[in-house]
Each structure stands twice: as C-alpha cells, then as structure tokens.
Image (tube, grey):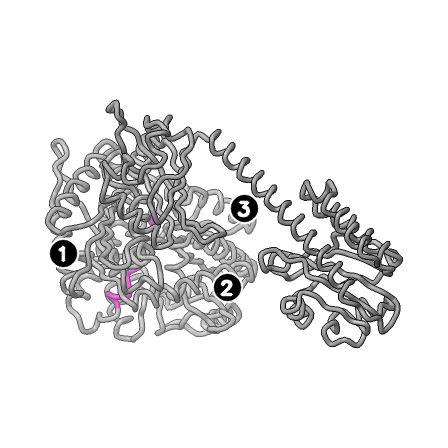
C-alpha cells in the first residue's frame, strides 16, 4: 500500500461522521471495508469483548468469506494464550494460523474450516483495557505481515478505540443528564456528599420543599450544617460512622423547620466509589410525616389488645423472635370458656381485665420486658434471663400466687384456675419456637392435680416429637384402615354367663405392631382425629352386633364415646342411621362416656342422653368414682349402667377404704335402679367380694382379655356349653 493511500485511509476514518459522532459500529463497518479494499484481504472484521472479557461478539465484517458458516468462538475467556499475547504485544501476526500456538484455541473451530492461513489481529484498547479486536485474514499461506501493514492496522484500531471512547463518554453524559433530570423531578431528597471533605456537592430541589432550607444554603457547605446533625447529633454521628465503614445507614428522624413546624424524615445513606477512586455518599430522604403517623396508629391498633390494653400475640411474637435468651411464661386461665358461658361475656371480660392488671403488677417487681394477651384466655410474659432453674420455678410460683387470688365481680366471687408454664429461651432456641414449647408444657401442667406449674424440659420435647410422629401415622392409619376392634367379655355375676362385650380399638401399626388406645387416643383427641376414629368404631361395632344377633347371640355391645364425639352435634343422627341400617335390638347398644366428660355441659348432655335413650340406646358412665358427678345429676340423666373404675377394684382385697367405696357405689346404684359393672377384675377374691355385694356384672383378665372377633365368638360359644355353677 502506498504511503498516501495509507494516510488517506486513516483520514477517511478520522473525518468520518461515524467517528465524530462516536458511532462505533458505523466506524467499524467503514474501517473493515477500507482495509479489505486497500490490503487485498480475504476478510476484515471487528469484534467486541464483554465487560468481563468472557465473551466476544461481532461488530462489523467485510470480505469474501461472509457466507461461510464457521464463526469465532464466542467464549473468548477460554483462549488464554491468545489474550495474553494481545495484552503483552497488542497484536498477533501469523502466516500459519492453523499451526500457531498463540491461535490454537481458535484454529480448529475457525481458521481450519475456513482455510485461513495468515492472520493479523490487533487489540482495540482504551486506558490499557482491551475492549475488542481488529481481525485481518488471508487465505494465502506463509504470508509475512510487514511493519507498514501492522502500523496501518494498529492506527485503525486506535481510531476505533477513540470512537468507542467517544461513544462511551456520550452515553455516560446522557445517563448523567437523565439521572439529574429524574432527581430534580423526584419528590424525595437526593444529595451527594464528598466522603473525604464532607462537603455537599449536589442536592436536588426536593430538599427545599421538605426541609424549608434553600439549595444555595446547602450546596458547598459541610453535612454538619444540616438540621439532622444540629438537632440529633448523636444519632447523626452514628449514622455517618456506619456509612464511613462502608455500610448503609437507614432510619427515621423527627426534625424541625425554621418556621417551627415538625416533620418526620425517612432517610437512607449509602457509600459509593467513582471510577477514579473518589469516595462519595448518596443520601435519599422522603417526607414521612403522614406515613409515620398513619403507621403509628396502625401499630397501636395492630399490636394492642383493645380489652386489656396489653400487647397482642402478633407484637409479642415479634419481640420473642428477637430474643435469644430470657424466660417465657405462659399463663392459661383454665375453664374460662365455661365461666364465660355460665356468667356471660361481660363478667368474663371483667375477669380478663383483672387478670391482666395482676400480671402488670407482677411485671413491676419481676423486671419483665414484655407482657401480652396471646389468646382468648392466655397471657405471655417475657423476662430477662434467670440464674437457675430454681429461680425460674420460684418466679413461676410468685406469678401463680399473684394471679390466683379470688376476683370479686359484682356480688359474686370467682376463683381463677391457672396453669403456668416457663420456658428457658436459650435452651430451645435451635430446636423449637418458645411459644410452641410453652404449648407443649401447658398440656402437662393442666394434668397436675394442684398448683398447675410446669417448667419445660428436654423430656417434654422428646415426648412431643413422639406424639407428632404418632399424629402423622394416625392420618395414614385412618386412610389405610389399620384399625381393628377387639372385644372384652362382660360376665353376669349372678347367672355366671357372658352377656355382652366392650368394643376396644387396636391399631395395627406397620412398624410398631399392635398398639393399645393409651398410645394414641389422647393424641387423636387433641388433634380432632378422634371424631373420624370414633365414627369408624361405632359403625364397626354396630355391624358386628348385627352379625351376632343374626346368629342368635344375645349380647350387648358397649362402645366408648369420646367427649369430642359426644358433643360434636351429630352423634344422635349418626346413631339413628346405624340403628336403622343394622336393625339393632333395643338396649343392645350401650354407649359409654366418662362422668367428667358428661359434666362438661350439663344441659346439652341431658338433652342428648334423653334423645339417645328414646332411640333404645343404653347409656353407661365409665370410670365411675373418679369424677365429680352427684346424685342429683345421676337422677337427671337417663343412665342405664355405671362402670366402677378399676382403681377401686384392684385393691379390694387389701384396702378397707376401697371396699367401702365400692359398697357405697353398689348401694347407690341399687337405690337408683342402675346396673353396675366392675372393671379390671383379675382375681377370684375380687369376684367373690363383688358377687357377695350384689354387683351385677364384671369384666377383666380373670375372665379374658380383649379378643379378636373370631376368638371372642368361640369363647362365648364354648362358655354357653358349660353348665352353670
């Protein structure tokens, strides 16, 4: 190429509109076309690199090989030797591209398929960083690129670099103009501060609208002249220190304008570094006055109990989540629902307010951090960490004594019944939520006969986990029909014949084998699954009773009914449907419920018992003697049978007290004309005492444990063949 042609080529690029306007693509297209024409090339192209120099992408291309499918690999980061050579020498000139080690990563996928033998690649560099590459290619092998050609390509690459730099500058200027315009239009404050000098170098118009301070009184001054630093110096210094450590500072602060009006400012301050390494702080702020007042009102409504004035569960849970140590007390007002139903909601509210007042008093001398009403009849207290478990128990007793005193409501006096649990938060932090632990412990506290206080411990947690597994397995058991009824014979002590059976559920657990009710009934009660289980038991028992009656076995079927099932509201309809479907003889189906459960709701229980009795269903009080029923209620209920609890029968032969209790129960039942069954009879001596005392029926291991249906049927048939004694 002649010198004037070389100079003319460079001038055409320098003077081009694309170069002047910073249009890198158009300038690259012009450069590749000129180089192709003046240097007898097979192909000329310009490639750009991504910001991380991981990928390359085509900018412009001119030549005879445009329709060829072979392309340079886009993953330029994998071409290590190629990049290293460009960084060190700024160009690669080769007459044997397919064999050159510097080009080996490009050879197999690009040079060889296209038949390119001679290559000149020149770096397009801005401020020492390679932004792309100018590629000149020839098919002729062993071509020697002379210094003049390398110089021309390098000068073109430099002009392309200048064009790209101009393009980037225009883009940044456009961005800066855009950002400034948007900042000036914003309703929120935008401020830029030099982190070294602490001088405010930019602030938008919103600052004047919000703070009342004009822009000209802020620009050029230090940030310590701002109202924030003057009116809240300690808070402001802490925020500044946080930002200077490279962190973001955020907050809400109340400030006062020059005219005396007050406002809330919500701000955010974040550090940043410019490309030249200068450190700045960007501050944004909004007038948060209306939102702050609205939020405060919402929080007051959202976090407070309107009746007691205490915080509610949502607020307490938030505080509890932030506590890594301390003590959680949960106070449960036992029997509050019954009190509410009996005395009315107005008196119930008075009781709750008094309990809340006493807990506030306890907070005063116990240094409690938070107190809240977390349920309809539950209160929670968060205390600082106690030294020992003994101290924790002592505090629980103090709280109990503080709250349990009688409450006067009008002319009446109520005696609150409490269950209190305590949880050491640090000991359960990584295991279960503290409130969950409190709920677990509450179940055990309520089972205590007096002073119902329970400290949560690992044993309770293990028991809870076992119960949780049983609960999950119960769902599968209900779906998978894993239950079976066993039948324990009931013997008439006068005729010495078996006159009935008690249906007892067994669970064929796939891993644990046969489980007795004690292993799962309580959990079924707590979770509500007892209704589904009870429904299945009742239908299975009625179906079996129908089969016995069809085979002329004159037996009564006793079926236990849980409190949930009894008070569910649909027991009458369920029993009526089963009696109709299976055509069961009157008085052959006997439902058993414990006296404690029966006394839960006297009015409802009386009506339901009367309705069931009219259907021809017998009713038995189970575990009699362990509850608190009275003669008046026994006369009120249409009861056909009492079952003496096994705890009285077990020591009949050694305890005079048990003998007197059993004798009294038998006498009472006789006076009321109610049938009696003694449970848990295991010895002939027990049987003899019961027989001589004129007890009607008995059941227990003396006769037989609960049997599967086939075994029970054989057992009864075999007994029927035996002569009576």
Q: Is residue 674 visible?
A: no
CA gap, disc 1 to disc 3? Answer: 56 Å
Stretch of the chain drawn in magenta: 637-649
Name which of mark 2 and mark 1 comes first in the sequence.
1
Name the mark on residue 66.
none
Which mark lies nearer to you, 1 or 3?
A: 1
Name which of mark 2 and mark 3 comes first in the sequence.
2
Identity of the residue drawn at 26% across and 39% down: 229
Q: Is residue 647 magenta?
A: yes
Which residue is tagged 2?
Answer: 483
CA gap, disc 2 to disc 1? Answer: 44 Å
User: Observer-nearest residue: 85 or 206?
Assistant: 85
Which residue is tagged 1?
Answer: 397
Q: Position of residue 115 (x, y in %)?
A: 87, 68
Q: Position of residue 253 (x, y in %)?
A: 29, 37
Asked if 289 appears above or below 53 in the picture, the reply is: above
User: Observer-nearest residue: 310 or 282?
Assistant: 282
Which residue is tagged 3?
Answer: 580
- Identify the element where label 2 is drawn: strand
């Amino acid at each position: 190429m002649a010198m004037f042609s070389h100079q003319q080529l460079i001038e055409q690029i320098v003077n081009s509109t694309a170069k002047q306007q910073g249009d890198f693509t158009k300038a690259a297209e012009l450069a590749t076309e000129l180089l192709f024409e003046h240097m007898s090339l097979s192909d000329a192209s310009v490639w750009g690199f991504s910001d991380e120099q991981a990928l390359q992408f085509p900018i412009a291309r001119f030549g005879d090989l445009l329709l060829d499918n072979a392309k340079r690999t886009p993953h330029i980061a994998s071409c290590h030797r190629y990049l290293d050579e460009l960084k060190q020498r700024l160009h690669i000139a080769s007459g044997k591209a397919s064999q050159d080690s510097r080009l080996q990563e490009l050879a197999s996928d690009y040079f060889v398929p296209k038949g390119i033998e001679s290559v000149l690649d020149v770096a397009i560099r801005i401020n020492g960083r390679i932004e792309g590459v100018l590629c000149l290619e020839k098919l002729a092998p062993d071509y020697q690129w002379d210094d003049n050609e390398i110089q021309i390509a390098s000068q073109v690459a430099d002009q392309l670099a200048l064009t790209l730099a101009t393009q980037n500058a225009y883009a940044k200027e456009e961005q800066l103009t855009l950002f400034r315009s948007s900042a000036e239009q914003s309703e929120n404050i935008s401020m830029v501060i030099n982190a070294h000098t602490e001088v405010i170098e930019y602030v938008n118009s919103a600052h004047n609208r919000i703070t009342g301070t004009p822009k000209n009184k802020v620009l050029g001054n230090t940030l310590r002249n701002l109202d924030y630093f003057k009116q809240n110096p300690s808070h402001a210094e802490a925020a500044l220190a946080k930002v200077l450590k490279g962190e973001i500072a955020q907050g809400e602060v109340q400030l006062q304008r020059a005219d005396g009006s007050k406002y809330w400012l919500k701000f955010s301050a974040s550090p940043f570094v410019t490309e030249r390494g200068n450190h700045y702080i960007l501050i944004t702020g909004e007038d948060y006055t209306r939102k702050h007042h609205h939020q405060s009102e919402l929080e007051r409504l959202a976090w407070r109990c309107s009746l007691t004035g205490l915080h509610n569960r949502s607020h307490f849970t938030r505080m509890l989540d932030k506590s890594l140590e301390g003590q959680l007390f949960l106070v449960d007002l036992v029997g509050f629902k019954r009190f509410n139903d009996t005395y009315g909601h107005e008196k119930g509210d008075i009781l709750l307010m008094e309990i809340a007042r006493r807990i506030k008093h306890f907070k005063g001398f116990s240094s409690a951090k938070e107190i809240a009403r977390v349920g309809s009849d539950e209160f929670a207290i968060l205390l600082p960490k106690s030294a020992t478990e003994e101290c924790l128990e002592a505090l629980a007793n103090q709280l109990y004594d503080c709250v349990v005193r009688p409450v006067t409501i009008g002319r009446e006096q109520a005696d609150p019944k409490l269950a209190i649990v305590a949880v050491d938060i640090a000991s359960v932090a990584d295991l279960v939520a503290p409130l969950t632990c409190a709920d677990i412990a509450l179940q055990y506290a309520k089972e205590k006969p007096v002073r119902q206080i329970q400290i949560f411990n690992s044993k309770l947690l293990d028991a809870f986990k076992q119960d949780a597994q049983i609960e999950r397995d119960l769902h599968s058991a209900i779906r998978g029909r894993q239950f079976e009824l066993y039948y324990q014979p009931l013997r008439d002590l006068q005729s010495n014949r078996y006159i009935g059976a008690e249906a007892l559920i067994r669970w064929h657990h796939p891993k644990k084998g046969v489980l007795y009710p004690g292993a799962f009934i309580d959990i079924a009660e707590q979770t509500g699954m007892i209704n589904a289980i009870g429904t299945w038991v009742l239908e299975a028992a009625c179906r079996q009773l129908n089969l016995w009656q069809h085979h002329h076995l004159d037996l009564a079927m006793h079926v236990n009914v849980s409190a949930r099932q009894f008070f569910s509201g649909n027991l009458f309809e369920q029993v009526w449907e089963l009696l109709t479907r299976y055509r069961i003889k009157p008085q052959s189906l006997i439902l058993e419920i414990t006296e404690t459960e029966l006394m839960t709701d006297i009015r409802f229980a009386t009506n339901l018992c009367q309705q069931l009795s009219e259907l021809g269903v017998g009713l038995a009080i189970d575990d009699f003697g362990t509850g608190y029923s009275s003669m008046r209620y026994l006369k009120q209920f249409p009861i056909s049978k009492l079952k003496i609890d096994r705890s009285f029968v077990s020591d009949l032969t050694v305890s005079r007290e048990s003998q007197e209790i059993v004798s009294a129960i038998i006498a009472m039942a006789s006076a009321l004309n109610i049938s009696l069954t003694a449970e848990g009879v295991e010895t002939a001596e027990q049987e003899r005492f019961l027989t001589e005392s004129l007890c009607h029926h008995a059941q227990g291991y003396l006769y037989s444990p609960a049997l599967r249906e086939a075994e029970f049927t054989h057992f009864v048939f075999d007994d029927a063949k035996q002569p009576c004694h």
